[in-house]
Image (cartoon, rainbow, N blue to C red):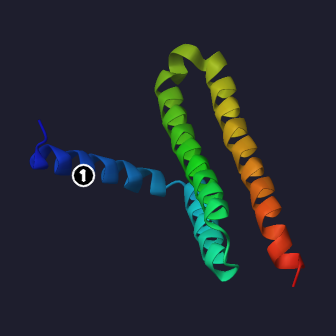
Amino acid sequence: MFSLRNFFRSLRYALAGLRFVWRENNFKIQIIIGLLVIILMFVYHLSRLEKVALLITIVAVLVLESLNTIFEHLSDILKPRLHDYVKIIKDIMAATVLITSLGAVVIGLIIFWPYVFSR
């Protein structure tokens, strides 16, 4: 059954997690880039579908950066016991964020190119 108290408790935990991830420099950079993209969406009057594609892309990058932070901290906990694998795990997660970020750049270029260079 729905409980308003439980909902606000869950929301408080989620916001605490968001504050923790906000301390990560890369997350801040990605938030700023995401906000700039959102501003440009309205400056160039993108279609609804283009806006949705960009928003999904922005959210994907932020979610993966958050997951990367989780894996980094979990890896740090396990480091003394599994030191050989910790670097591999961290590198793979960083590569995952990089691939997603590069994909986001490509998607952004595909969508914005006609608007920017057709004027």
- Judging depth in this view, the residue of 95 and 104 nearest the camera is 104
- Judging depth in this view, the residue of 82 and 97 nearest the camera is 97
Residue displayed at 59% across by 47% down? 60
Which corner quadrant of the image does residue 29 belong to?
Answer: bottom right
Which corner quadrant of the image does residue 43 belong to?
Answer: bottom right
Q: Is residue 56 left or right of residue 105?
A: left
**Image quarter (top left, top right, bottom left or bottom right) of the N terminus:** top left
Q: Secondary structure at mark 1?
A: helix
- Judging depth in this view, the residue of 21 and 34 nearest the camera is 34
Which corner quadrant of the image does residue 41 belong to?
Answer: bottom right
Q: Is residue 36 left or right of residue 70?
A: right
Residue displayed at 59% across by 68% down? 32
Residue 47 vertical placement versus 25 (above, below): below
- Judging depth in this view, the residue of 6 and 96 nearest the camera is 6
- Residue denoted by label 1: 12
- Which residue is outermost to the bottom? 119
From the top left corner, tell me how far across and down residue 35 is, in percent.
58, 70
From the top left corner, tell me how far across and down residue 13 is, in percent.
27, 46
From the top left corner, tell me how far across and down residue 74 is, in percent.
48, 29
**Image quarter (top left, top right, bottom left or bottom right) of the C terminus:** bottom right
Residue displayed at 80% across by 54% down? 106
Residue type of the residue flagged with mark 1: Arg
